Image (cartoon, rainbow, N blue to C red):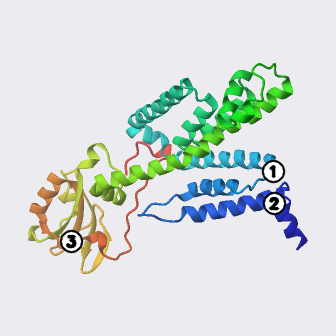
Amino acid sequence: MHWFENLVHDQQSPATCVFVLSIVILFGLALGQIRWKGLKLGVAGVLFSGLIAAHWGLAINHEVLEFVREFGLILFVYAVGLSIGPGFFNAIRARGWTLNLLAVYIVSCGVLVTVLLARSGVPMPIAVGLLCGATTNTPSLAAASTTLQNSPPRWETARAAIANVAPDYATKLPVHHELTADEKQQLGQELSKLPGLAYAMTYPFGVMGTIVTLLIARWIYPQQAVADSEQPQLTGRFRLLAEADLLITQVRLAGESVRHLLEHRRDLVISRRLRNGEMVIVTPDSDLQVGDIIKAVGSKASLDWLTSYVGEPAAIDLERLPSEIGIRWIMVSRRELVGRTI
């Protein structure tokens, strides 16, 4: 049991640091899984768990904490890039400019508020941390902390920043002081903690603001929220696409191929056919018989024409029937396939 006692009491050893981090992350993930009205914190619960642990005085080795923070941020940014990379340029071409302009507007408003706070007396390191926390932007926090650590401000600016965090301690510091090289390095390390402090204070409110915004949007537009969750978002002319299940009753269509039926209708597609309880995928050479039920996709006007031409609407939905045929939305990201026909 000596190893366990050393693990608990020696808070500066790497093994203890890993153990403490694992426990904090475990409780944070458990906290993030708690649902409230369909919403949950997710991985953001780890931050709240860390805040509680630090409030209770739980501290670990600074070097280990620095390494874990930087390495975790690297993994986070890499995972984000890896997940959105295949469809990034396609998304930029589709709606990228609109979304980026909105993002620039939102960030500009945040920067404007940050500048106003700095002009009103809030030290810039703290104001930057407030911006990073309010927008839940962890990479920006890392960049700001690194900048402060490598390029600390003048002594007067640093003293004013310290006065906002520890006013009693700041009164003991001289108003003017010429910093040595070691003092500049130490000052940069201490000031780099100020954005993180402000970030930790505002991050929970940034998360809660996002959740409250989602709740308000779901309350104002309940039907739109359900529709967006059930189907992918389509843009441009694809918004006009619809689908219909049709029962073939016209005798003249017996034995006619799908190719001949849709020979002059390029705005229609027949995807599947149900005959005698057997559902198959339709090909251009598939034949049609009276009593078949087909699934057609196209514009509403084209589907109205097809309905009157082949028969009448069917009373069943072929997609809901059990079969080995499924539907999957796939984004084309391979460059060699661009421009090729199906």
Cα distance between the residues tagged 3 and 2: 66 Å
The answer to whether residue 154 is seen in the rendering is no
**Residue at the spot 38% in from the left edge and 67% down from the top edge:** 326
Please, what is the three-letter code of the amino acid marked with disc 3?
Ile
For the residue labelled by badge 1, is the local secondary structure a helix, a strand or a loop? Answer: loop
Residue 289 sits above or below residue 181 on the image? below
Please, what is the three-letter code of the amino acid marked with disc 2?
Thr
- Contact (Cβ within 8 Å) of mark 3 with mark 2: no
Residue that badge 2 annotates: 16
Q: Which label's residue is closer to the chain start, 1 or 2?
A: 2
Residue 113 sits above or below residue 8 on the image? above
| Residue 293, label in figure | 3
Image spot of residue 187 (x, y percent): 77, 30
Image spot of residue 275 (x, y percent): 24, 76
For marks 3 and 2, give the one nearer the viewer. Answer: 2
For marks 3 and 1, give the one nearer the viewer. Answer: 1
> Would you say 4 lies left or right of 88 here?
right
